[in-house]
Amino acid sequence: MDEAICELLTKHYHERYRQSVVCRIEEDFVVKKHHIEEYIKNPLAINSHMVKFPENTRNYIYKKANEDVNDVFKMIKYAVSIDDGPEVDYVKNGIKNKEAISDATDMPYNSLVTLVDKDNNPINFEFSRSIKIEKIFEVRVPKDDITFLKRVNIPVKSFRLDYSFPNSDVKLVASCFGTLAFSNEGNMKIIHESDHISIESYSWLLPGNGVFVVAAKQ
């Protein structure tokens, strides 16, 4: 464990991670619109150490027979700025969905969606100092899927999630499971409203930490 923690100190991390999720009901499904902003830094930038950062979108979805995956998962924007350079929107560059049969036995999904380039190759970004990523996408889930779970893959210095479900008959309940995040110590803040929850962590979240939100019927 000591070696694993020390290794994290030399790897890239999220200086800032922000995610907003707005839900709406469409027939027997819930459509969730995600807006994600990531600012990732390289602690070894002074040594001109290059970092390879793989595109990490993975969404488990439920797809009807003969249904097009693009009707369930829609990437609207995928903008990237490397080392403060010009922003590139990879949706306009031909990024697309790649579908695979889901191997998850504990979730009510039958497909896994990842992103590839126009030639079906995995997407990787290389940067020296920092990379900024903005994603906007919509994903449709079954109406009885009441749980949202977000785990971080790399350390996060500053994290915030806003989750909204307006014009519905559900009550949102949420919490953060962080190794160093405890609300009674002042390094985590949770704001509950009738149809909105905001969770912000002021301390480090480590890989595997994250938040969960449950939309329970009132």
Image: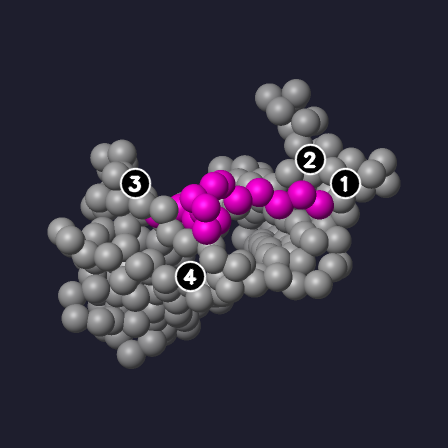
- Hey, what amino acid is under mark 2? Lys
Q: Are marks 2 and 1 in contact (CB under 8 Å)?
A: yes
Q: Where the N terminus falls, by quadrant?
A: top right
Q: CA distance from mark 1 to mark 4?
A: 30 Å
- Hey, what amino acid is under mark 4? Met
- Residue on which the image places disc 2: 11
Q: Viewed as shown, does residue 54 lie left or right of 165? A: right
Q: Are marks 3 and 4 in contact (CB under 8 Å)?
A: no
x, y (%) of residue 15? 68, 51
Q: Which residues are magenta?
A: 113-127
Mark 1 or mark 4: name the one nearer the start of the chain: 1
**Which element type, helix, strand or loop, lies under badge 2?**
loop
Q: Is residue 180 above or below residue 27?
A: above
Q: Viewed as shown, does residue 89 lie left or right of 103? A: right
Quarter where residue 80 is shown: bottom right
**Which element type, helix, strand or loop, lies under badge 1?**
loop
Mark 3 or mark 4: name the one nearer the start of the chain: 4
- Hey, what amino acid is under mark 1? Pro
State which mark lies toward you, 1 or 4: 4
- Residue on which the image places disc 3: 100
Crowding at dot 1, Cα within 10 Å, few <14 / some 14-19 / many 20+, comes out as: some
- Residue on which the image places disc 1: 43
x, y (%) of residue 195? 36, 73
